Image (cartoon, rainbow, N blue to C red):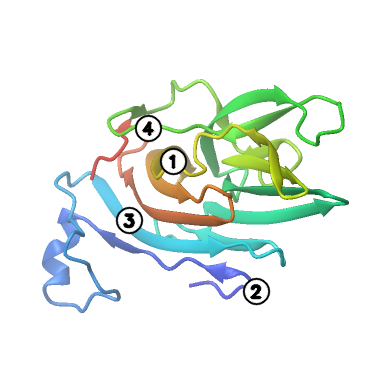
Amino acid sequence: MKTTTNKKTKIAQYSVLALAASAVLPVACNKDDDDKVTDDPLITYVKIDSVLTQTDLDAQVEYIDLNNDGIDDFRMYTDVDSNSSKVKVYSGVYADNTTRAAILSKKITGDFFLDGSTSDKYFNLAKNSGDVVNASQSIWFNGKVSSEVGGFTQIFTKAGVTVSDQAGDFAGKGDKFIGVRFKDGASANHYGWLKVNLSANGRVLRVVDGAYHVTPDAEIKVGAK
């Protein structure tokens, strides 16, 4: 685990190929009763269960190294931007390395700063269990946290009242999924998914778990383990 000033997500992976070894070697995490070893030896299931809570302080960040190769693929991020009586909360999962990772996204044009101007932003696209994640998907966006990226949602409040909730596919909607892509050490693409949960006010972000296909360029179904 790389040492960083931000919190670092430590994940545990389970696969049929590693099952025999796990019977001999101790596992470095506690498995819940509903943790499952993947039924498909070509899909690696990843237990993450990381939570960020934004309390109007500094931005909260955790890094996710989905395939445990020592290189961060994605980052969880929550932040609050206060300007006069307007408060903007934004949260999401972003590609941490723009040359290695990307997230299925959708482009929205809107007045994201409530100043009368319009611009384009890329928001995480909510996927359903059973949806396919592959190279043919329309928008794979690899931007980090920036003016172009909206993440899951941007919630504006003015005098304590919500006046704008952009791209609200996640806030207060329970467990949802996003499609992800990352490169391995040989620069081959792998496709996967992450299960996420965002509170209605956008301030509590949880990444529950995920999975990826070990075969380069192979598609994966959301929720497959």
Q: Is residue 143 visible?
A: no
User: To which residue does mark 3 refer?
Assistant: 46
Q: Residue at x 44, y 20 (%)?
A: 136
Q: Which mark is residue 217?
A: 4
Q: Which mark is residue 62?
A: none
Which percent across, then down, holds residue 68?
41, 61
Q: Residue at x 22, y 67 (%)?
A: 32
Which of the 4 image quadrants contains residue 146?
top right
Circle 1 or circle 4, nearest the eye: 1
Give the mark nearer the N terminus: 2 vs 4: 2
Q: Is residue 199 left or right of residue 17?
A: right
Give the mark nearer the N terminus: 1 vs 3: 3
Q: CA distance from mark 1 to mark 3?
A: 22 Å
User: To which residue does mark 2 refer?
Assistant: 5
10 Å crowding of disc 3: few (<14), some (14-19), many (20+): many
10 Å crowding of disc 4: few (<14), some (14-19), many (20+): some
User: To which residue does mark 1 refer?
Assistant: 173
Residue at disc 4, secondary structure: loop
